[in-house]
Image: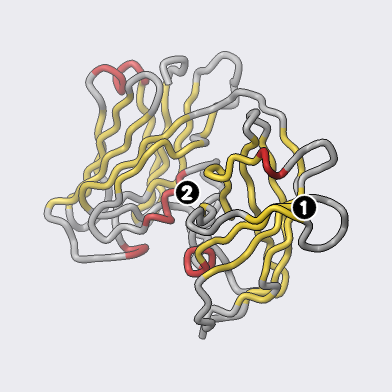
Amino acid sequence: MSSGTTVTIWEQTTNITVHVFQMSEVMSTGVSFFTAATVSEIYSVTSDGTYLTIYCYKVPPEPMTGIGTGNNIVAVRLDGVLEHPEGLYASTIVSYVVGVGGVEESRWNALGPETQVGPYMDLPYTAMGDYGSELVLAFMYVDVEQIDATLDFDPDTVNPKSNGKWVTCYIELPEGYDPEDIDLSSVMLNEAVPADLSHVAAYGDADGDDIADVMLKFDREAVQNTLMPGESVQVEVSGVLEDGIVFSGTDTITVLDKN
């Protein structure tokens, strides 16, 4: 953060508003802004020079849950970094606190540009809670090696009415890379749902194609919250190998309407 000159925050309360702050002020005294919410909604923004912290509260808190709650961050961009004149958007959720009525999965909607909808319900903004919610963001621009993985998502058709508790993903890596080198704690589905490590990862060759794979489980309800109904819905699994190489793979599935 200390390498930038300004930070721009897009926030949505009915309409998207844009707030631009000097980094010197953010790092010294912190800054704050109000929204157009009917009940006073206040954001405070601070930085330790490495990360950016956005804290939100309402006075008094409203008894709301889900997408109607506060802390509606659309995007955050760091400007003035010499090596990146186009600006750096927040790329990592370092930590977070879910406030009153907040939705944990919505935190990922704060990443990326302001024109991008998030993985949670295709909303452009977060819904982290009306009171006492917090997002700590990082802005990374280190170039890393990336490889394409092959993903097989099971089931091929997701029925929200199903009573199943898990979905299964089989991940194959390109020649020269070993699935056993994957840092399992880094694996995410649709950048929102972590692999459930209470299930032991199964290494083998599930499809019999002589290419090693790893089988991982994910919480079905959490996955469904990232999906919209459709016949050709793309799902992505990504993660990091122990040597820092990033991988991602996609599969296309059918998602039935829950109504």
The residue under the point 52% across, 83% down is 161
Binning the other alpha carbons within 10 Å of mark 2 as few (below 14), some (14 to 19) or many (20 upward) gives: many
The residue under the point 78% across, 50% down is 212
- Report the residue marked by disc 2: 108
Task: Give, as a three-letter code, the residue at label 1.
Answer: Thr
Residue 45 sits in quarter:
top left
Colour setup of the view: secondary structure
Q: Residue furthest bottom?
A: 259
Binning the other alpha carbons within 10 Å of mark 1 as few (below 14), some (14 to 19) or many (20 upward) gives: some
- CB under 8 Å between callouts 1 and 2? no
Report x, y in % for residue 126. 40, 52
Image label count:
2
Q: On screen, 145 above or below 149?
A: above
State left or right for residue 226 relative to residue 62. Answer: right
The residue under the point 46% across, 18% down is 4
Q: On screen, 63 above or below 98?
A: below
Task: Give, as a three-letter code, the residue at label 2.
Answer: Trp
**Secondary-structure class at tag 2:** helix
- Report the residue marked by disc 1: 150
Q: On screen, 225 above or below 186?
A: below
Report x, y in % for residue 3. 46, 15
State left or right for residue 133 relative to residue 241. Answer: left
Closer to us: mark 1 or mark 2? 1
Residue 112 sits in quarter:
top right
- Pick the residue in front: 138 or 58: 138
**Secondary-structure class at tag 1:** strand
Report x, y in % for residue 155. 67, 72
- Pick the residue in front: 4 or 192: 192
The residue under the point 32% across, 37% down is 54
State left or right for residue 25 relative to residue 221. Answer: left
